[in-house]
Image: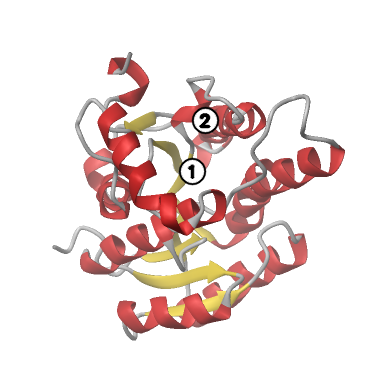
Amino acid sequence: MNRLKNKVAVITGGNSGIGFGIAREFKNEGARGVIVGRNQETLNSSVAQLGDNFMVINADVTNITDLESVFKETAEKFGKIDLVVANAGGGTVGTVTSLGEADFDRTIDLNLKSVYFTVHKALPYMNDGGSIILIGSNAAHRAYPNFTLYGATKAAVIHFAKGFSSDLLNRKIRVNVITPGTTDTPAFEKFVPAEQIEGIKKHFAGEMPIGRIGQPSDIGKAAVFLASDDSSFMLGAELLVDGGMTYLSK
């Protein structure tokens, strides 16, 4: 339970869902560090569960000045940064006929600009030999209805893992990407009426080859692997944690 002992991590979107699942698994493996988000209430409740080795920073990952402050403040507090998880993301779902320029810009800002500049602003403060983990989506591989724009941005994130790894070979910083499938997070509440959520979850579970939807802890355990020395021979790789959806579903 000490694979990340003494490692300092920054996890964007670490206050809920997949991000919090990752933060909790990191904490269980001995890491300390920072969770970043915009909702102060969920930041406070999440860090209370993580304990004294974690702190929160309220920041907007699409704001370059905020990102600069996140990494500067973390380095000042902990003296170093070993691990970065660029988890924050989102966007608007819809089709090419329904999504306009504002939707396009918002999704690009959340899923591409934020990831690129999270890494860009972290690098001056990161230790050589560190690990960066990006979060993709199996929507990058499958053309789900209404997820065209979202899926395209996540396909680009998968490419970022390859390109960033190539860019950072001289610093021995590994960049890999986790691609989740449908995961049980508060995101359901944003897109589905409350009275329909359980039914939708059951529907997705029936579609998953493994017979259930993912849990944040499933993604968190995969992130621990990529953050630890257990994955030292992996860089620029995509780790599918999707219950078999990408390759096995009909």
Query: Residue sitting at 69 percent across and 27 percent down?
Result: 95
Residue 134's label in the rendered image is: 1
Q: Residues within 10 Å of mark 2 (few under 14, many from 20)?
A: many
| Above or below, comparing residue 60 to residue 197 in the picture | below
Residue 181 is situated, as x and y percent measured from the top left of the image, at 38, 35
| Quarter residue 27 falls in | bottom left
Residue in front for this viewpoint, 236 or 217: 217
Residue 222 is situated, as x and y percent measured from the top left of the image, at 28, 44
Q: Quadrant of the C terminus?
A: top left
Q: CA distance from mark 1 to mark 2?
A: 8 Å
Residue in front for this viewpoint, 9 or 240: 240
User: Three-letter amino acid code at disc 1?
Assistant: Leu
Contact (Cβ within 8 Å) of mark 1 with mark 2: yes
Query: Residue sitting at 35 percent across and 45 percent down?
Result: 199
Residue 13 is situated, as x and y percent measured from the top left of the image, at 52, 61
| Above or below, comparing residue 80 to residue 158 in the picture | below
Q: Quadrant of the N terminus?
A: bottom left
| Above or below, comparing residue 193 to residue 103 in the picture | below
Q: Secondary structure at mark 2?
A: helix
| Above or below, comparing residue 18 to residue 242 in the picture | below
Residue 36's label in the rendered image is: none
Query: Residue sitting at 76 percent across and 66 percent down?
Result: 65
Residue in front for this viewpoint, 4 or 92: 92
| Quarter residue 46 falls in | bottom left
Q: Which residue is denoted by mark 2 in the rendering?
A: 158
Q: Earlier in the sequence, mark 1 or mark 2?
A: 1
Q: Secondary structure at mark 1?
A: strand
Horizontal side of 41 relative to 94 (left or right) equals: left
Q: Residue furthest top?
A: 250
User: Three-letter amino acid code at disc 2?
Assistant: Ile
